[in-house]
Image (cartoon, rainbow, N blue to C red):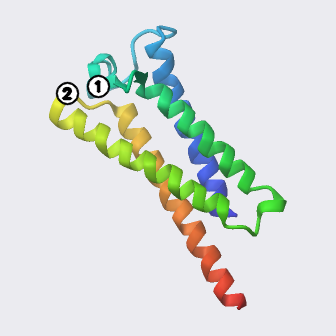
Amino acid sequence: MKFRMTAALLSLAGLFVSLYLYLYKLGKIGALVCGTGDCEKVQVSQWSRFMGIDVALIGVVGYVVMLGVALAALQPALARVRWPSTALVLLAGVGVAFAIYLTWLELFVIHAICRWCVASAVIVTLIFIAALADVRARVAGVHAHA
């Protein structure tokens, strides 16, 4: 259960990051607090949309789905089943692949780094690792009881 709880907490953190970026895109907050890097350059670039959808909105939806799956996985009725963890591996795996693509764009096309985007990439990678660890633990548990 600790890996599922970790995935849920990380999904919540990722939701906050992506929601912050989406609120910026909607004009609901002022300048991004970025410290170092050039978050605004990344956020206003043509690459901040994917197939016509704001990347930040894709993040919001993705993290909401992962949070929902992770919270469902914490319910006693699903405590012993593997499918929620497998679903998290698949969802976070897509997120990691997308984060790699976006990071490549930041480094080699936009020539600017957004710390919030990097934070999201780290968060989705950690969700992927936690979900993999949960699947592995459940497989090991099945084989230990066989």
Residue with the most extreme right position: 77
Residue drawn 72% across the image and 56% down it: 73
Residue 29 visible, this angle: yes
- Report, in whole angstroms, how far the alpha carbon at label 2 lies from the one at label 1: 8 Å
Q: Which residue is mark 2?
A: 110
For mark 1, give the secondary structure.
helix
Instruction: Locate residue 40: give its quadrant.
Output: top left
Camera-side residue: 48 or 107? 48
Label 1 environment density (alpha carbons within 10 Å; few <14, some 14–19, many ≥20): some
Query: Relative to the observer, which residue lies in front, 52 or 99?
Result: 52
Amino acid type, residue under disc 2 in the picture = Ile
Q: In the image, is residue 81 above or below residue 30?
A: below
User: Which of the image's four quarters has the C terminus?
Assistant: bottom right
Q: Which residue is mark 1?
A: 47
Q: Residues within 10 Å of mark 2 (few under 14, many from 20)?
A: some
Q: Residue 98 placed where, x, y %? A: 37, 42
| x then y, percent, for residue 56 | 45, 27
Question: In the rendered view, does 60 fall on the left or right side of 68?
Answer: left
Residue 93 image offset from top left, x and y in percent: 45, 53
Query: Which residue is most to the front?
Result: 51
**Which residue shows up at 40% across the image and 43% down it?**
121
Q: Would you place residue 96 above or below residue 30 in this image?
A: below
The quadrant of the rendering that contains the N terminus is: bottom right
Q: Are marks 2 and 1 in contact (CB under 8 Å)?
A: yes
| Residue appearing at x 62%, y 61% in the figure | 85
Nearest the viewer among 61 and 74 is: 61
Horizontal side, residue 61 vs residue 46: left or right:
right
- Identify the residue at image location x=48%, y=61%: 129
Q: How many marks?
A: 2
Amino acid at dot 1: Trp
